Image (spheres, helix red, strand yellow):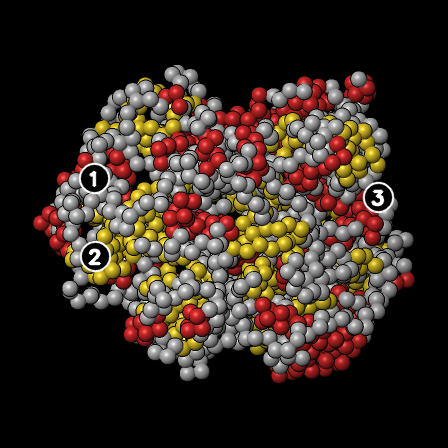
Amino acid sequence: MAESPAFESPVVKRYKAATGALTLSDASAATKWLVRGPEAGAVADRLGASFGSSCAAEGGALVLGSRPGEWIVVGVPGAVAETVAGIDGPEQSDFVTALDWTHGRALFRVTGADAPRMLEKVCSLDWSDAMTPDGAVTSASVAKVTCDIARNDVDAKPSYLIFCDRSFGQYLFDALIDAGDEFGLSVAPADP
Amino acid sequence: MLLVPCPNCGPRNWSDLRYGGESHARPDPATATPLQWRGYLYLRDNPAGWLRENWYCRSGCRRWFTVERNTATNEFRDPPMPGDKRGAKA
Amino acid sequence: MTGIVRRLRRRPPRYSAAALVWRGMRGDHWPRIWRDTELKRSYDAVVIGGGVHGLATAYYLARNHGITDVAVLDKAYLGSGASGRNTAIVRANYLTPEGVAFYDRSLQLYNSMALDLNINVMMSERGHLTLAHSDSSLRTMHWRAEVNKLQGVNSSVIGPDEISEIAPSLDTSSHPRYPILGALHHPPGGIVRHDAVVWGYARAADHMGVELHQKTEVLDIVCEGGEGSNGKGAGGRVVGVRTNRGDISTPIVVNCTAGWAGLISAMAGVRLPITTHPLQAAVTEPVKVFLPTVVVSGSLHVYISQTDRGELVFGAAVDPVATYSIRGSLEFTEELAGHVLELMPSVSRMRLLRQWAGLCDMTPDYSPVMGFTPVDGFLVDVGWGTYGFKAAPVSGEQMAEAVATGRTPELISPFALSRFDTGELVGEKGAASVGH
Amino acid sequence: MTMSRLGTARPTEVVDRSSKVRFRWNGKRFSGFEGDTIASALAAAGEHVFSRSMKYHRPRGILTADYWDPNLMVQVGDDPNVRAGHRLLEAGMDVRAQNVWPSLHRDIKALNGLVGRFLTAGFYYKTFMRPAWLWPTYERVLATFAPGGRIDPDTPHRYHDKRYTHPDVVVAGAGPAGIEAALAASAAGARVLLVEHEHAVGGHLRYSSSASARAALAELRAALDASDVEVLTDSTVTGRYEDNWLAIVQRSHPIAVERLIKARAKMLVVAPGLIERPYVFAGNDRPGVITSGAARRLINLWGVRPGERAVVFAANSAGDAAAADLDRVGVEVAAVIDGRDHRRVSAAQGSPKAVEAVLAGGSRIEADLLVVAAGWTAPTSLLNMAGDRPVYDPAAARFFASDPPGNVLVAGGLAGDGSLDELRAHAAATGRLAAQRAAAVAHRLQARTARARPAEGAEPAWAPDERTPLDRDPHPELYRSDTHGMVDFSEDVGSKDLVAAAREGYDSVELAKRYTTATMGPSQGKLETVNTVAAIAEARGETIAEVGTTVWRPPFAPITLGALAGRVFEPVRVSSIQPWHEANGVTTILAGQWVRPDHYGDPAAEVRNVRTNVGLIDVTPLGKLDLRGPDIPKLLNLLYTNKWSKLAVGKVRYGMMCAEDGVVLDDGVTGRLGPDHYLMTTTSSGAGAIWEWVENWLQTERPDWKVHVTPVTTAYVSINVAGPKARELVGRVSEGVDVSPEAFAYMEVRTATVAGVDGCFMWRIGFTGELSFEIHAPAGHGLHVWEALMAAGKDLGVGPFGLEAQRIMRLEKGHFIVGQDTDGLTLGPSTGLSPLIKLDKDDFAGKPELAWATERRLPVIVAIQPDDAGVVPAEASQIVRGETNEILGRITSSRLSPTLGRSICLGQVEPELAAGGTKLTVLLTSGERISATVMDHHAHFDPAGERLRG
């Protein structure tokens, strides 16, 4: 079998390198799995994140409680594989399914003190610390595209992971750049 | 912008949801008469008052849910948010 | 036949330029436009709803059939509902043959209305453009044009160059997200001064003896013999109406209450295929007249016209959520503005002055429900959705005929309530997602 | 009157006399100072006429000298209807008077004033009816009276981004009460947004001459600067919608032309102050008749002397203050007419630059300025929008809130009267109450929202309103003097018009408004609403309270369409292969949200290449749902009209979905990838709706079924490889699959590695009627797979084809498209697929209607060929009965077939015309009637499907 070719991001335009305090980066190449099962039960216990929250799995993957009874596991391939290994296996008594969603979802990260103010321009949710603290996970319309969003602060700066349908990737990336323009947003290199 | 009380996501702007209309039971297709079936398809109570209705949290949890809303005032019986007594007219 | 006697007795003061000058010079006041009368205990017929439909029904009952012992009841003031809240567009370019024939008759009645009613309703036959932004909507425009032509209605599909000539402010370049690929051009369409239509029918009906009762709210419809509670429902008949000003006995009740149609019908035990949704509209501050025609985009859910006063009047599709609350929403104006600027970027500095909403009685097939019901003497003229205003004259004419003859006139037979029992719906839905 | 700049600066002045700003007014050069409004600069330069009235073209001067001044609407560059009483002067502004012809000072339409008695309210309803053919001409003439500025067709839609915000408390109005409320709420821990309509906070304190007012203002400003309150000036809370959803228009923003801020406020404090109301008397709209507020603002904010000799009509302390200010800056105050002593101004008259005041009783006073302080209008707009019905208090001569919802509180002059200290104390209590209640709302929101930080402790109780109500000062009810005058300055509607309308029967406020257009113009009732009600009340012999008020509709302050639109978000989707399409001469088409290849130059050639060699089409938008779980067959049986229980692993089946009314909803193929794993495809346009439809059935009707549905439309690129050489091409690039016809038959699915990409699957189906392999490859390698296929098939003549070629080929094959060949009333059996409607199944969506449909006379979809092979009837051409206009059907699809060299169609016809061989008459759009024949099969080409199955 031939070597698998490189991952192609939905973001195909090229941007100037990052300079400012508010950055946007493309992390679409990250491995993403979608796990579904009962909202309470063995799988929920194993993954550890309840709906609306997130947690780091042992192998380093990030687990998002994206919907009731639904989790997104994201990270480098090995870490995600470790977290989801056998999760939907026949030994499970509950009805559990898991699928690789890497190619279905674009993933972007916005980081910086002004990130909440930038998101206020494209999403109607309340980004205050009380309503969307670090670790919070939700789904909402961003620039009219339905996205899964996780707050995942970096170096004590607000940072958000934004997932959308891959086909909207280029559109949303550009919409985020436009929204961030007045805060001096710049595009950082792709997130590993 | 009306806030709709999604049982999972909390209050959300109505435009984030799909309105599913009056909640009504589907007759048994094996026994339904044409009048019963077409009543299910077309006829509605359409009250000016409390209505059981369906919503789909399209941008959020993607769950259908049923709530009661007063169609004269758009108040949800959920219970309503504190302090939000509404008038029907403007 | 007291009505005829009364008709001979009352002579309306004519409106004309000469009369204006004469009264202006003498400093005379104009007499009241309609009488203020006591509510009687009994009428030959009661029309519920003092909007254009109810008033037109009463007018044609008196004029065409000599039935003048009629009361029109309205819970607020005449024209307070959708009649005074719509965007006053008239047209006949529908999709189905039955729709085209019906609205064409309405347009004819609008064209002769000023002389018929002796009031200037300011019918402005300025043409009507329905824009197509996709192949599929262009196909629907062709479909409508073809059906219209077969019915003798002037409609044709035109291209971007012709559109630019008619309305230069439209962006017919290829770069918008919703490029203008073509349009259904309907020269006989236009706008009418909606209030004048209300007042014209009211004044003319009043002159023939019809009584108009404002602030008269119907609390119940009294029935007997029906299969439901209190004699209501199928198989029964109407005997009277209870109002906040007392009870009335009458064998005929015509329900012309648009958004409230379901509530009034429920009083007679008749369930309707109707849900009530707000329809919003808005108007800008005036600027010098630059838009000579009515512009509609179905895909963008917007219709635009400029009044002779210079205001742009905007309408949209009905709100998706069923409600009787008519408080306007911000999201409506945001979406509206976005869509208007998509079509006409140059109006971005115009300011929105006022927004409002009315209630629409939406049916599953975007067509009305007209005529008889399972309750004898209870007739409906409802389900008008977003296009009631343009149908008012013909609806009044046909409903009056139904009341007077006891038979369903052919022109409205496709719109019978019974079609929802048989599933034979009217195919107007495809063209009418924004029915303006 | 002669206005001029005062020689010495006022201590409250906002202009910077050291900084000159040059601009143009009606083409002439003018200058003002930094901090001037357009109007103050013009007034200081001695201008006294700013506009002409709408109907009678009467000259109009400054009335209120603020945003609401109806006489100060001007054109600035391409910006029409700019409020010159508010807009700050900028260097180089090109300001022009509106509604003047040919010029501001010589306006020919002013002749209308002479015939005014014939142009009574609503006169146009009573005339211009005969002759009917002349009405369009009349209409054009009437239209020339449209007031307002002009639209420049080249004005672009500039940068207007919007934003959302979620403050605890929004305070509308930063007068002393608003500031105090904001400070108190902020001190109590609330996040506060304070919104001020004017360019600076302070309200009436800004133009008060009293030292104590100045001290209070300085103190409030300092406190505000030291607080966490976010302050927006030159911004207005212009709408209050459900659940305290607030529209705030921010008129000065560093980047945006005008910005709409959408605030979800937990509490709203309404503190807009009061609007001074004009008094109705003859000549009340003459230049030189101004409100007391205008006089004080001109003097104290901009250092403008409003006249030389003034008469002041004062019914309240604002009038007294204006008289004192006038005196202070050297304007001779000829008389103060005290409205509290039942004295009245009866008329204003005189030569253009003079204002002779006529008092009730007939005495006259020569002057050039008449300052009027007759009372207040309570701007209850936001309360109205919150559902409140304000009530009139005759003792205070204004409206007050009656019972607003608990998340809306009122402070300042809208709530009552009192000393500055009393108003501030009340406002502070209001701010504290707002903060307490906001905390309760915040607690509830946190408790209910999964992502939020958990709410701590019990929900705080809803704080009761224990504020001490403000007193209401008595005020004389002054609406109209003993003469008639102007009520609505924007619309040129006088009290006489309103009285006449009421007498004519338009005697409710709403009818009179509609008939006269009072309150319908740009000022939207700010100045005239109470005077309108008063005029009708007077005509009816009733009190204002009995007549009631009119409803203030949003927006409170007008907002540009640009700000409302903001940046228009119109998402578009592209496939991973889009870069290749763009590099290879594609012409794209927008299909729903998708940007799709329509063709690459010559669709007919693309068709021929597919029919002879092999072609690739990017069909990524094809809806794809990943289904997992043991109950999938039950689900498929419920959704589709045909049967699914026996679909084997590796097999694919076509199905049609109908809605519960039997109308065709969607169609597509579903394949079984594994025992409990299926892939469902839907039409591209139906992808989103069908996903919701499936979820609806699973969640609401069959929650016990074990099925998980995941939309994977964009997780895969979908490439259809079609043509006689398709097998050869696919075989060259795939591993792990035997593509021979024996091993991989029509309507089967296989997983494979394609061009080195694992996890692809492919199925043998095709819309084109050719041998086809539809490859679904992980989207992150989609471009690679496409390019590999292109490279590998060079010698086979591989080429891309677009949607148009596919449309032609599917029509050659007679495949209908849901939504094009079907419509909103097309029931399942009309498609000709009745064998796929299995009425012996227990239940499926639409089953009862489909069962009864067998009894009904339904239109039928048929293939049609015009007898003249070269004529292609346009889609939507009608099928008629002979030479009559009776409609029997229509052409739903038509193309010239490159394969057959003739025109081919699908159409819907009445059932009696559906048999093969039936002759039809088709009415072309040109009006010509042609004959055509109904075909035996839907497929015009290869009806047996031999190529497909090969």
Instruction: Give, as a three-letter code, the residue at label 3.
Output: Arg
Q: Position of residue A18 (x, y in %)?
A: 34, 76
Q: Position of residue D372 (x, y in %)?
A: 78, 61
Report the residue marked by disc 2.
D752
Q: Are marks 3 and 1 on the same chain?
A: yes
Q: Chain of mark 3?
A: D
Residue extending farthest top: D883
The numbered mark at residue D540 is 3
* Element assignment for label 1: helix
Q: Position of residue D937 (x, y in %)?
A: 28, 28
Instruction: Give, as a three-letter code, the residue at label 2.
Output: Ala
Report the residue marked by disc 1.
D948
Q: Are marks 2 and 3 on the same chain?
A: yes
Q: Earlier in the sequence, mark 2 or mark 3?
A: 3
Q: Earlier in the sequence, mark 2 or mark 1?
A: 2
Residue D598: quadrant of the picture? top left
Residue D460: quadrant of the picture? bottom right
Cα distance, mark 2 to mark 1?
21 Å
Instruction: Give, as a three-letter code, the residue at label 1.
Output: Leu
Q: Are marks 2 and 3 in contact (CB under 8 Å)?
A: no
Q: Position of residue D398 (x, y in %)?
A: 80, 59
Q: Chain of mark 1?
A: D
Residue D41: quadrant of the picture? bottom right
Question: Which residue lies at the image location 58% right of the left edge and 68% below the top edge?
Answer: D448
- Residue D237 is left or right of residue D306, and the answer is left
Say if residue D5 shows up in the picture. Answer: no
